[in-house]
Amino acid sequence: MTERVLIVGTGLIGGSVGLALRRRGDVHVVGFDTDAANADRARDVGAVDEIAADPGLGSQHADVVVVATPVGEVLGAVDAIARAAPAGTLVTDVGSTKGTIVAQAETLLGPERPFVGGHPMAGTDGEGVVAARADLFDGALWILTPTESTDSSAFRRVNTLVTGLGARTLALDPDAHDRLVARVSHLPYALATALMSLVADDDDARVFGAAAGSFRDVTRTAGTNPRIWHDILSTNADAVGREIKGMVAKLETMREALERGDLDTVDALIDSARSARRRLPLKGERTPADPITVEIHIPDRTGVLAEVTTALGEGGINIEDVWMDHTAAGGTLRITVDGRANAEAAIGLLSLRRFRATVLEEE
Amino acid sequence: MTERVLIVGTGLIGGSVGLALRRRGDVHVVGFDTDAANADRARDVGAVDEIAADPGLGSQHADVVVVATPVGEVLGAVDAIARAAPAGTLVTDVGSTKGTIVAQAETLLGPERPFVGGHPMAGTDGEGVVAARADLFDGALWILTPTESTDSSAFRRVNTLVTGLGARTLALDPDAHDRLVARVSHLPYALATALMSLVADDDDARVFGAAAGSFRDVTRTAGTNPRIWHDILSTNADAVGREIKGMVAKLETMREALERGDLDTVDALIDSARSARRRLPLKGERTPADPITVEIHIPDRTGVLAEVTTALGEGGINIEDVWMDHTAAGGTLRITVDGRANAEAAIGLLSLRRFRATVLEEE
């Protein structure tokens, strides 16, 4: 049966979700945007089949709703959906911060409409649906944030949707997600903005003329959408503040070492940074797919899906697929990961949490 | 007459100088490297015509010597040249810091062998002569650092050499150069290193998996040549320390604003950074060449070349060409800049320093 997907917010991410879904096929995509011209453009570029008059109406016939508005508008959209969507409608979002959004979305939608928070870590320098691309998520990381109340079939549906767009998924607790992105995305933005603002204060023509490769690279995101960043920084202020504090301490260590001519400390910083940098995977690098399924015996209680998947997420292990068999004695959760090394690591992480897990050998 | 150039240090920069010179033609390039295999590779890739046995011997028949060793070895090479090169040999370098190098090189070489410090702001992720390219300096900025003792003909020869490699030049006082690069290059490196070292401390697999575009961009230089950066940071410690201090103050402003929920301050930072970022010229962007010559009446005394050219450099004005006419009453310095706007700006900057300057209208 053709799946019906409503995308609320047809900008860069929403538009790319639409293009990637329609590339996949066997799906009917309905779009809504508070700016009607954006929705029209999304239809013109082929990101949606149809435009909805409002998110509530659109959600009445949707199997899945993807809320892809700016962070500050996610909960307003979820509220409209909660008032109109029938029981069973699955809702997910793509907001860059998750703590507040996930807690409130679950409350608004209630137990009848499952919510699984998501965050695709993909983007371009462009803005809006004109910059949308069907391959935006190919090989990108898409973090999912299950909670105590997330059931395995809802998680599986969102996981399948997202891997179908080309992404690899990682499950993290919403707060763990916010701490992680504070470090890998929001702190780099804060650095770009602070450095660019420092330069703006002096307004020195020479700096603008001499700003070479590394300066341009470091400050790139300072030129991007200010509204998105306002929302992100304000909804993740605590975690970003902590990361800035850690960064300031590092910079002070370096400055004090330079001041007293302690080059051993400077060299130790240089060396630790260099060897860590060389361990970053290359862009788009991915190990060859070698699906291995891990079978986990679990008690039949709520919260166990989040507990198991986020245990893997904390270890950086992507989830290729996940499904649950209920039996009289409890249940069996099967999770497919990529490669035997990840499977072994998953079993280790799970045993620390007292789960019995084994590799499901192929017959 | 074919110009004879000796390049001491045939790595990425020295090798690219050789390739660019030989692309230009009418030049005989001799190379020396403390690592004989590097010199051989430079000859194999066509960066040099001939290999010298040592820098002193090589300098005995050179019109110009380009010292392109790592910063920490520049003065050793200059010393060897000072002991062997005949009077009149012109020496320049490509070191990333200039204060100490320029002062000491002038002392070592004495008045008979003119020295003009230089710093090409170009590079790639690659290292060594295998990464060298004839077009590495096309459109790149090459800062020259004349001093009180620099005479106009030596400056002109180096300026002509460097613009012939494809670069645009800016004249700055050596200390002004060090302050500028501390901001546009060494501070970005310090940020890359501090951020990467912060991540290395935690060694969190998720961070490595989730490190997306902006994190990769900000930390790029942390993976590059540690020896070069050791030399740069240790020879420019004061200026780098000052820039780190400024950066820390900006980050603390942002952190405190986030902590007290003062989003107006956060937005002001975002906006100032964004509008400054959008004023950065695009990579390789260059205004169309429209050479305009400014004529400056100067007293015939030493130091005036540096005074005039660095006045333009402080204003970010590139020097296309420069030459001097000596007359009974003093002298006339003619400087060619790109476009009438730069010429007017130059005249304004010079009048602040009580120089009479006019545009030399074409006959």
Image (cartoon, coloured by chain):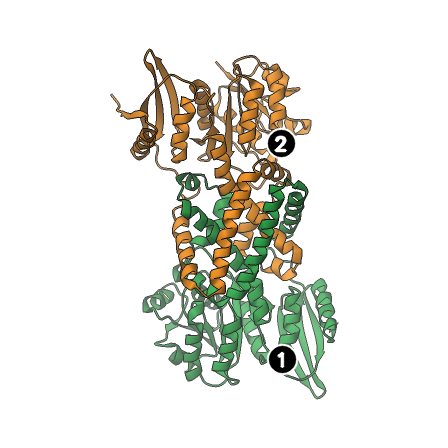
Chain colours: A orange, B green
Mark 2, chain letter? A
Q: How far from the left and from the top, in percent, is residue A20?
A: 51, 28
Does residue B361 appear to the left or right of B74 in the view shown? right
Secondary structure beneath disc 2?
helix
Q: CA distance from mark 1 to mark 2?
A: 60 Å
Q: How far from the left and from the top, in percent, is residue A344?
A: 29, 32
Q: At 48% across and 86% down in the image, what residue appears?
A: B87
Would residue A163 be seen by someone viewing this image from the given angle? Answer: yes
Q: At 38% across and 31% down in the image, what residue appears?
A: A312
Q: Are marks 1 and 2 on the same chain?
A: no
Does residue B186 appear to the left or right of B266 in the view shown? left
Which residue ends up furthest to the left in the rendered image?
A363
Quarter where residue B54 is shown: bottom left
Q: Amino acid at mark 2?
A: Gly
Mark drawn on residue A72: 2
Q: How far from the left and from the top, in percent, is residue A9?
A: 61, 28
Q: Amino acid at mark 1?
A: Gly
Mark 1, chain letter? B
Q: At 57% across and 65% down in the image, what residue appears?
A: B179
Q: At 48% across and 69% down in the image, what residue appears?
A: B25
